Amino acid sequence: MRRLFALTLLALLVAVVGCAASGPKEIQVAVTEKGFEPKNVTIKQGQAAVLVMTRKTERTCATEAIFAETGRKYDLPLDQPVRVDLSGVSHGTIHYACGMDMFKGTVTIE
Ligand SMILES: [Cu+2]
């Protein structure tokens, strides 16, 4: 009985670890004085992906990112990673920019 319990626990652990490993791919985008870096990223179609945007400077007007295709707006507080879920977009290029439309970036799913 005890052995069965241990086996069940082991199976559960494997399932949890396996799940974590196959989670969405995280793509890091930094906001620097030069804008969004990297500016353009590409994701394979069908792959779950999350854009993780982190603003790393005070000297930028990019304190938010506005996504043209989805109309979603994300505040970018200093040094705080902001997760942008891209699971709703299946194909094509998504454009985003700062509030003034000065710094721009794209995500292409292909
Ligand atoms: Cu701007």
Image (cartoon, rainbow, N blue to C red):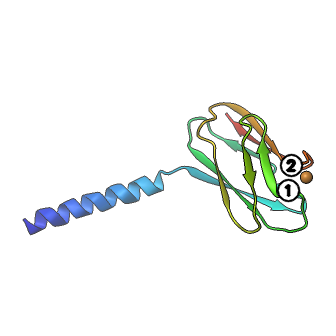
Query: Which residue is at the front of the view, 20 or 99?
Result: 99
Residue under the point 80% across and 54% down: 64
Residue under the point 66% across and 30% down: 91
Secondary structure of the residue carrying tag 2 is: loop
Residue 17 is situated, as x and y percent measured from the top left of the image, at 39, 60
Are the residues flagged by discs 2 and 1 in contact, CB closer than 8 Å?
A: yes
Residue under the point 31% across and 62% down: 13
Quarter of the figure with residue 16 = bottom left
User: Residue placed farthest to the top in the image?
Assistant: 91
Residue 80 is situated, as x and y percent measured from the top left of the image, at 70, 66
Query: How crowded is the residue under tag 2: few (<14 C-alpha within 10 Å), some, or many (20+)?
Result: some
Residue wearing tag 2? 99
Residue 79 is situated, as x and y percent measured from the top left of the image, at 73, 69
Query: How crowded is the residue under tag 1: few (<14 C-alpha within 10 Å), some, or many (20+)?
Result: many
- Of the residues shown, which amino acid type is indicated by label 2? Gly
42 is higher (above) or lower (below) than 27: above
User: Residue placed farthest to the left in the image?
Assistant: 1
54 is higher (above) or lower (below) than 86: below
Residue under the point 15% across and 64% down: 5
Residue 38 in sight in this render = no
Does the beta carbon of the residue at mark 1 sit less than 8 Å from ligand 1? yes
Q: CA distance from mark 2 to mark 1?
A: 7 Å
Split into 4 quadrants, where in the image is the N terminus?
bottom left
Mark seen at residue 87? none
Residue 87 is situated, as x and y percent measured from the top left of the image, at 58, 40
Residue 61 in sight in this render = yes
Does the beta carbon of the residue at mark 2 sit less than 8 Å from ligand 1? yes
Residue wearing tag 1? 62
